[in-house]
Amino acid sequence: MTQLLVRGATFAAVGDRGDISGVRGGGQVEGLFVRDARHLSRWQLTVDGAVPEVLKPVGEGDTARCVLVPRGGRQEPPAYTLWREQVVGDSSFVESVRITGNRPTATTVRLALTVDADFTDQFELRSDHRTYVKAGAVRSRQVLDDGIEFGYRRGEWRSCTTITADPAPEAVEETGTGARRLVWTLELAPHGAAELLLRVVARPHGDRHAVRVPSSPAAVSGELRAAEEEFMEGVAFPTAWPELAAACVRGLSDLAALQVPARGPDGEGLRVPAGGAPWFLTLLGRDALLTSLFALPYRPQLAAATLPALAATQATADSASPVAQPGKIVHEVRHGELAHFGQVPYGRYYGSVDATPLFLVLLGAYTERTGDAALARRLERHARAAVGWMLDHGGLTARGYLVYRADEGGLANQNWKDSPGAICRADGTRPSGAVMAAGAQGYAYDALRRTAWLARTVWDDGTYAALLEQAAADLRDRFQRDFWLPEQGFPALALDGDGHRIDALASDAGHLLWSGLLDKEYGEAVGRRLLEPDFFSGWGVRTLAAGQAAYHPLSYHRGSVWPHDNALITLGLARYGLHDEARAVARGLVDAAASAGHRLPEVLAGYGRDTHPEPVPYPHACVRESRSAAAPLALLTAVGGA
């Protein structure tokens, strides 16, 4: 197993002895990553020519600590013990290696560290077996007085990784593989000790900010703790429900680390919630918006940063991407080499049908919650453009609903369930052509209403407000007529391009409660249905009700349990007065968190609690994900400390 160390746009994944193996492919990729590139691909320690044994493996936490000993047997106790301690900072990685002698005589230790930086783009390391041509790419290695610097260039692309040590290595050896081996000979006095301090600084392409080289792991750990404490200051945790309080504390701790740099409309520096580690440590529109909405009553500064960051990346008429239309809010922003050269479409990718209405929902909610109208005035132009997209390119005027079509080379599905087979009928068949996803219509309804309120109270435009209020009312009337499945007493997952209902019973119906799209009678019926055993696993509401042919407990979106999905459902249940049901879902999630150190993962398997007394992990979930980290805060809003 690998351990993740995360700080902003930087993360390291190390093995149980603190090494980075350099293995490519698979789900457990090790390395130091900054802005979508791997800046350390090997970091392997040997002592006296051999890999040491693990006495205590790396455990969880923001500091990776392990204890190692040289290989030996019971009849020959180890001559020395190695204590490794590692942390990540902003574009940096720091390790201390302390060697303590265990004998009453002097001991000589030959220590070597094999290092390399392959600068591989994250998309090359995913398990989809894709390959990318990188013509003209050149790697370089320059020996320094106290270490080595690895460089990479391809056309105008430049990046480098600098490794320094104190004390300096006595030699830097070639390995025949491109990696280099740093070597030290350390003399230990009887029962004496020696320490080695290693610092890594990554300089990705286009990142010109000055990197402060951390002095030690302890110094970085102190900075991380101080940042977490500041981020949590003033939040009132529920004393009557300690498990929920612990989940909120863990979530806020993760949110403090999961913030990446971004720019606002005037170039101002911001820090916004990232999607999650390891693969989505970047700005994802939908994820940042939902995270900010969940945290709004407790940490409104997340919304205050997310909104201008997304306004700055809002599509204009000049956008080249086929799914970038004027007024649309970005789905994903990437900074890596493949995005830079257009080999993946995600540099600024707009394949999301719901980020745009969620932008408007958050802007209205932030203004109402904080009373700060300045941001709504500043972003009025962006908000009106977002409404314009919904009415025009989004499809509300022409089709009556927000519509998307599969993007060749990008995402087939562009709602929150964006895996290829996520939108399906109960029998598992997929629609072709245009799709009108139910949840997105709820977001659009809420966006129209909230923007109408902004127009009336902040922008002093009653005519525009009335137009949006009428559009929202019409959408609500249409939806209940077109989406409702009378035989099931439940809304369809989506409509296809011909207006036919896609009849899978899915958790998206709970998002309609959160948005307030359904009439009270329909909403109450939907809320109670979501708590029946085929939907509710005991840990949360499944994305797809069991018993349907399309259901699979280990499918990404067709039977799994997503904490953020359930947070929205819980807020929706509370909105419709279904407080017992809201508490039941909240308890399931809190219990699931308690079984994993009070941290909610991105997604859980859909197996029921009645047959599996512990929640079953989903095999490829992000371990630290911003929406899941913020989900306990949404539960606190919905049910309090009950």
Image (cartoon, rainbow, N blue to C red):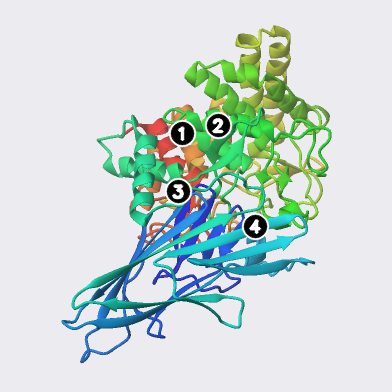
Q: Name the residue under label 4.
A: 159
The local secondary structure at tag 2 comes to helix
Front position in the image: 6 or 592: 6
Classify 182 as above or below 134. Answer: below
Distance from Cα at disc 2 to Cα at disc 3: 30 Å
Query: Which residue is labeled 3 in the image?
Result: 540
Structural distance between the alpha carbons of marks 3 and 4:
44 Å
Q: Residue at x 76, y 42 (%)?
A: 404
Q: Residue at horizontal 35%, vertical 60%?
A: 613
Q: Which of marks 3 and 1 is in front?
A: 1
Q: What element carries label 3?
A: loop
Say the numbered circle drawn on residue 295: 1
Q: How busy is the neighbourhood of tag 1: few (under 14 within 10 Å), some, or many (20 plus)?
A: many
Instruction: Mark 3 or mark 1: name the one nearer the start of the chain.
Output: 1
Numbered circle sitting on residue 305 = 2
Mark 4: secondary structure: strand
